[in-house]
Amino acid sequence: MLSKKALTSTLYDLMDLYRVIAPCQRDGELRFDRVSSPREIVLDYGNTAKSPKGVFFPQNEAMIKFGRQVDQFNQIKQVPLDRTPTVLLGVRPCDARSFLLLDAVFAQGRYLDPYYQARRQNTLIVTMACASPRQTCFCHAFGSGPYDREGSDIFLRDAGDAYLVEGVSQKGRDLIYQGYLGRASQAYLDKAVEIEAQANARLADIEPVAGIEKLLPGLFDSPIWQEISEKCIACGTCTYACPTCHCFNIEDRVLANSGERVRAWDSCMYQFFTQHASGHNPRPDQAARWRQRTMHKFEYLPRNVGLFGCVGCGRCVQSCPVRLDIRGVLRRVRAAAEAAATAGANVEE
Amino acid sequence: MSDTHVCTCNPSTQNPYLPISMVLQRVTDEVDDRTIKSFDLAFAREEDARCFKYTPGQFCEVSVFGEGEAPFGIASSPTEQGFVRFTVKKAGVVTTKLHNCKPGDVIGLRGPLGNSFPLDLMRGKDIVVIGGGFAFTTLRSLIIYLLESGERDRFGKITVIYGARDPGLLMYKEDLAAWEQRGDIEVCQTIDRGVPGWSRRVGFVPNVTEEVAPNAANAVAVICGPPIMIKFTLPVMTKLGFGKEQIYTSLENRMKCGIGKCGRCNVGHKYVCLDGPVFSMAELDQLPSEY
C-alpha cells in the first residue's frame, strides 16, 4: 500500500533512477510525457486523447543518418537506440494490453525492430486501474475490464486515500521490493473492492468481440463497407489516436549537410497509403480502406498473431469528427454475417 | 564494432532498417524510350559481398539517400558475381532520382527480402517462363539461374515466352540473343503488332502461349506481366492443362519497410513483402484480389 500523501516523495525517489513518463497537462491537453516534477502528474483521468504508444513507437523518429555529400554516403549511421531506464506510470489497463499487440508486431516474428525493442525492454509499465470507465469504453467486449492486469508490470488500485500496489510481472515485483510499502489494512482492501465494483457497474452491456474474426472473411465483398465509409472524411484521426494502430511511413529528410531517414505514423485511411507510383491503387476508395481497417484489426491480426488490433479504449469513438463508431461497425458486421447466413439457409431449403 | 559497420546479411539479428552501401557500377538503357534502365550495384565492402546471398524472385529496398527507398525485384542472378542488378522504370520520386545517378554514386541497399521462385519444386520439371513488358526483371534472374547454376540438367525443358508492345520495349536484348543461340532453352519473343525488320513472332502473349502450347505434364510455369496479360493468359494455361498450383506469379504492392511491419502491402492476411512476392495461383485464389 502507498498512501496518496507519500506518492510525491516516492515519485522523487523513482525519478532519481528512471525517466518517468506519465499523463501530464501539456498545451491544454492531457498527454503522456516525461515528468519533470511529480506535481505535473494527473492520475485521476478518463483517458488521454492520444495513446501512450508513442513512448515505444514515436510519432516521428529518425532511424538512420547519412552524409549528404556523395563521398560521405558510406557513413550511414544508425541513430543510437534509446535504452534509458523508464517507468511508464498511470497507463490504463486497455493501453497496457495494447503493448502486447505492439510487441507481436515489432518484437516478434522473423524481423525484430531494434528501436522499439530497446525502449520496450527498458520500460516498466505501472498501470492505474480504471475507476471510472467512460461511455465510449468497451474493453469488456474483449473479455478484459477496467481492472485487467494483463500487460502490466505493476498494478495500482485506488483505495480511498491510498493506492494498493501489486507486482504483476517479475520486473514489477523487483521494483516494489526496493521501495518501502506499508501492508494494507482490511479497510483499504474493502475500499478498493468497492471502487472496483462501482467501476464495473458503469460498463454498458456489450456483445463480446470474440468470434467476429470468423465472420469477417465472408464479408470481403459485402456492401457494408461502402455504407460504413460514406461519412468518413479520411482524416485519419482514429488511427493516430489508436493505441494499437502501428502502420508507418519511412521517408528521407534532407538537412543542411546531412540527412536522416525518418519513420512516421501513417494511416490506412489515406489514399496514398497504398497507391503505386503508376497510379494504380489496390484500395481505391474509402470503402476499401474501411474494410482494411476492420479486417486488419479483427481478422488478419487475430489470424497472424492471435490478438485483436483493438483493446476497446474508445479513443477513436471519442475523437472521430463524424462520429463513426467502431462498435457500430462491429454490430453491422455481425448483422451482415447473420443476414448472409439466413439467406444461405433459405437457399438450401 | 561501431554501428557504421553492421552487416545486414542476417537482418533478423541486426537492424533490418539499416542499408548497406553499394557503388553504382554501370547504367544500361533497356528500352528505346529510355524510361527503363538497369543499375548494376557493386558492394562497397568485401564482407557485404560475402554475406549477400539471394535466390531468384527476391527483392531489395534500394535507396537514394535524401530521396528515400523503394522496393525492386533483383534482376541479376546469384550466379552473376560482384554486382546486383535492378531494372527500374522512371515513375516516382526515388526512381526519377535513381535515373539521374551516375556510375560511382553510392546507393543504399536492404535485403534480400521476401521469398523466391520455387526452385525446389522446379527441379526435375519442365519450366515455362511467361513475361510481358517491364515485368521481366526477376524472370531474367530465374532464367540465368536455371542456365548457369551448374545444374541445368536438373531441370527439364525450358520455354520462355516474352512479349512487348514493340521491339524497342523488349528488355535484356543481349541476354535474349544469347539464349536464342543455345540449344537448351526455347525463346519465343513476340511483339503486339508487326514492324518492318521483325522476323520473330507477332501477337499478344496469351495467343502466342496457345500457339507454343508448352506441355503441362510435369511442368511449372511462372507468369509475370501487366494484369491484363495475366488475366488473359491464365485461361490459356488452364486449357493447356496447367493446374493453379503449377502456376506462379510475383506481386507488387506499395511497400515501405519490406519486413512485414509498416502495414500497407498486405493482400488479405498475407504480406507481399514477407509471405511473397512469389505466390502460386492456388494461393492467390485463397486471398482477396486486393493488388
Image (cartoon, coloured by chain):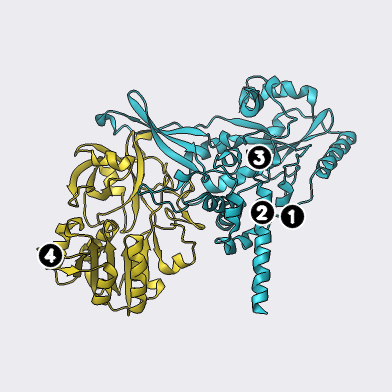
Chain colours: A cyan, B yellow
Mark 3: few/some/many CA within 10 Å (<14, 14-19, 20+): many
Read off the chain for label 3.
A
**Residue found at x 72% / y 55%:** A208
Q: Where is residue B197 shown, x and y percent of the image?
A: 9, 63
Name the residue beneath numbered marker 2.
A330
Q: Confirm or deny contact between disc 1 and disc 4 (CB under 8 A).
A: no
Using the rendered view, name the quadrant where residue B173 is placed. bottom left
What is the spatial separation of the Cα atoms under label 1 and label 4, in whole angstroms? 68 Å
Q: Of the residues shown, which amino acid type is indicated by label 1?
A: Glu
Left or right, B99 with respect to A86, comes to: left
Name the residue beneath numbered marker 4.
B198
**Residue found at x 32% / y 55%:** B54
Read off the chain for label 4.
B
User: Disc 2 on helix, strand or loop?
Assistant: helix
Q: Of the residues shown, which amino acid type is indicated by label 2?
A: Leu
Left or right, A156 with respect to A310, comes to: right
What is the spatial separation of the Cα atoms under label 3 and label 1, in whole angstroms? 19 Å
**Residue found at x 55% / y 60%:** A220
Name the residue beneath numbered marker 1.
A207
Q: Of the residues shown, which amino acid type is indicated by label 3?
A: Arg
Name the residue beneath numbered marker 3.
A315
User: Disc 3 on helix, strand or loop?
Assistant: helix
